[in-house]
Image: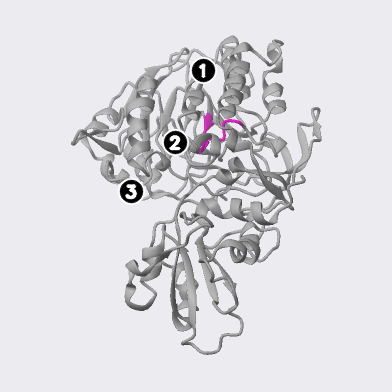
Amino acid sequence: MNILSTTDTHGWLAGHLLDENYSADYGDFADFVRKMKAKADSLGVDLILTDSGDLHDGTGFGDATTPNGKLTLPIFDQLPYDLLSIGNHELYTTEIANDTYTNFAPRWGGRYLTGNVDIYDNGVRKPFSQRYAYWQTKMGVRIMAFGFLFNFTGNSNATVVTPVGTAVQQAWFQQQVSRTDIDLFVVAGHIPVRAQTEWNLVYAAIRQHHPTTPISILGGHAHVRDSVAFDANAMALAAGRYCETVGWVTIDGLPSNVTRATSPMGSGTIKITKPSSVPNVTNQINSSSLSWSRQYLDFNRPTFEKHTASLNQGFNTSYGQGISGNITSEISTLPILTNLLGCAPASYYLNRYPISDNRSLFYYLTNTVFPGVVYATGRNTSAYPRIILTNTGGFRYDVLAGRFTIDNAYQTNPYTNLWQYMTVPWSYAQSLLTNMQTDKVYKRQVSTSNGTVYNSTTGTWLTTGYLTTDDFGAAGDGDNTLHINQGSASTPHYVQANVSTSNITNPSTMVDVYVTSFFAAAAAAYLPGNMTNAWINVTNSTGGSFSSFDTLPAYAQRFWSKNC
């Protein structure tokens, strides 16, 4: 059994134009999938395609339409997915939730699974989509599939997210999981695969009825490449983010009474002998006839071509080229996306470097961008000391050197949370950042240089990229293409710019505190009187609202060169 997996695409279907590691678009991917399915047929093996949610919020192509996803979802629909699950970004707003429920979920013939999400349809609470799916593959494998979302609490009030621990005790789940005509469980879910309570509960609920039946879990949400061993017959994989990664899982050794397939490539590379410790699960199996393989494929044409070359059919087809053409033509209907705002003078990275490093995006924001553009009219002089606080989870991607457009702005921060301020004594302002780092306010998930040299013989890009460590290997063992390690650094929940505050000695000195509306109520709790209605909206040069999304475009237009 072979599985291709995507997750957290967030509208990046046009590819990464400034990063050749991930430069394929969804037309290229469509050609790859179709050819890989043809390759599976010719070899007499099964191949299924899965997605683990979060299709919205991440690019101008996806977000600059009403509703959000109007152009990207029809592109996504053209791929032959066998199993999909919902993500939290499908549920933040009622508009997107209703569009997903009405127009997107029904297109998948019962394979868009939402085991713990409901919606109010004309006031009546209903399952958002199907709870489970059951089918038999071409090679005879009987699959029971489920789909889950983590215990999300930031959804619109038009939807209900049931805790996973409750969902797996419900009658529908117990009825299906207790069936005896199951050869393989495939569970797609928008849940990080490592050390996550929700997956432990799903795994334990299955193992209660099926102690040894194979389980393949396809996770997401954490924006990382990762694989986790649950037991000798159960494994989880997460396929990164943003059309940077295609996940690959192979399960070899299914008995002949389960599948007619045999492995044309020999056994898998992984034998799981050390199960993870999972509460309420005893006697986990630590040996099995099964072997596993996992790979993380870079989202580019050379990678796709390498794995389909044995078909001797070339790569481009009218199918994939048609989808690529659709992407180009649809983007052309939004000319604002490609309008030049300015030329980024260098690359600033979301999480490759510590926030104290001048290559960090948050260093650049707090030392340069925020002081330059985040202030109320007439309050940008030293007479008005200010601190400017932002939640790091609102930022989604790097700023790369060169052309910076509205589409790039959506990629970096797609959220339209309003900048607001109030004036408070320094005695309160000086400790706000420390207090907010441990605040319980819900945080959007934070995602954890380039060149053109590709060695087709070794399959190596001579560029920086992912070097993944998971339960089955270190330093790129599972990365299908080897890179120079791009590095990673942890990021605090909040960062802060300090403007004209260094000489304050009197705790009663009045200071302007700037936050966004996303966490303004939480910040007010640490300021005098907990006055959530005391925030004043910052306005732009024409008197309109000024949001987190507007920040980088405003700075680029005002301060960056227009000569790239």
As helix, strand or loop, the secondary structure at mark 1 comes to loop
**Coloring applied to the structure:** one colour
Of 102 and 250, the residue lying toward us: 102
Contact? badges 3 and 1 (CB < 8 Å): no
Numbered label attached to residue 68: 2
Which residue is identified by label 3?
280
As helix, strand or loop, the secondary structure at mark 2 comes to loop
Measured from the top left, where is residue 436 in percent x and y? 45, 68
Q: Residue at x 66, y 66 (%)?
A: 356
Nearest-to-viewer mark from 2 and 3: 2
What amino acid is at disc 3? Asn
Which residue is identified by label 1?
46
Q: Earlier in the sequence, mark 2 or mark 3?
A: 2
Please state, as top left, top right, bottom left or bottom right, where the C terminus lies in the image.
Answer: top right
As helix, strand or loop, the secondary structure at mark 3 comes to loop
Span shown in magenta:
5-14
Q: Residue at x 51, y 28 (%)?
A: 289
Of 528 and 396, the residue lying toward us: 528
Q: Is residue 369 visible?
A: yes
Measured from the top left, where is residue 39 in percent x and y? 61, 14
Measured from the top left, where is residue 174 in percent x and y? 25, 33
